[in-house]
Amino acid sequence: MQNVRVDIGDWIRPRLIADPEPVVDFDTGEIKINPKTGERDYLLSVAVRREGQRRASAIEVKVRGMSAPDVSEGDVITLDGLIVTYWEQNGRSGLAFRAESASRATGPGAGNAAPATAARTASTPSTTPPAGGPRTAKAGESA
């Protein structure tokens, strides 16, 4: 197997789509712990989209640490030292992603808040009738 560093320079705001969860042993159901370091692997589900593409893809990234990364569902994140490994086993194959660390993104476009217009609309009742004018009752229908 060969590890290949992933160039994420053209990714647009990778977003965590589920809270980090510890990786568990498939057979025993126990949380996997590295016996030498005491570190655990945490699984991050991340939505990624490349610049110029309309559709996003979901990938799962493992991050190792003494505690879960300080990120939560919906956060725009950065993945430092992201590598991908191609694997084959029992006639199956796939890609495994691993990062050295994950953290909340900072800077322009990193916020989690909804656009100001959406927030304003949600908190303030509308005084304008809906598009197409006010709804009128049809014959035989009560208003």
Image: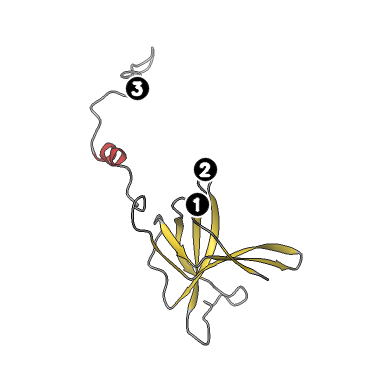
Q: Is residue 94 left or right of residue 105?
A: right
Label 1 secondary element: loop
**Image quarter in which the N terminus is found:** bottom right
> To which residue does mark 1 refer?
10
Residue 126 in percent (x, y) is at 25, 30
Res. 131 mark: 3
Label 2 secondary element: loop
| Mark found first going from the N terminus, 2 or 1 | 1
At a point 40% along the width and 54% down the height, the residue shown is 74
At a point 68% along the width and 67% down the height, the residue shown is 87
Residue 25 in percent (x, y) is at 58, 75
Amino acid marked by disc 3: Ala
Q: CA distance from mark 3 to mark 1?
A: 38 Å
Number of callouts = 3
Residue 55 in percent (x, y) is at 54, 44
Res. 52 mark: 2
Q: CA distance from mark 3 to mark 2?
A: 32 Å
The answer to the question of whether label 2 and label 1 lie on touching residues, with beta carbons closer than 8 A, is yes
| Mark found first going from the N terminus, 3 or 2 | 2
The answer to the question of whether label 3 and label 2 lie on touching residues, with beta carbons closer than 8 A, is no
Query: Outermost residue, bottom direction?
Result: 36
Amino acid marked by disc 1: Asp
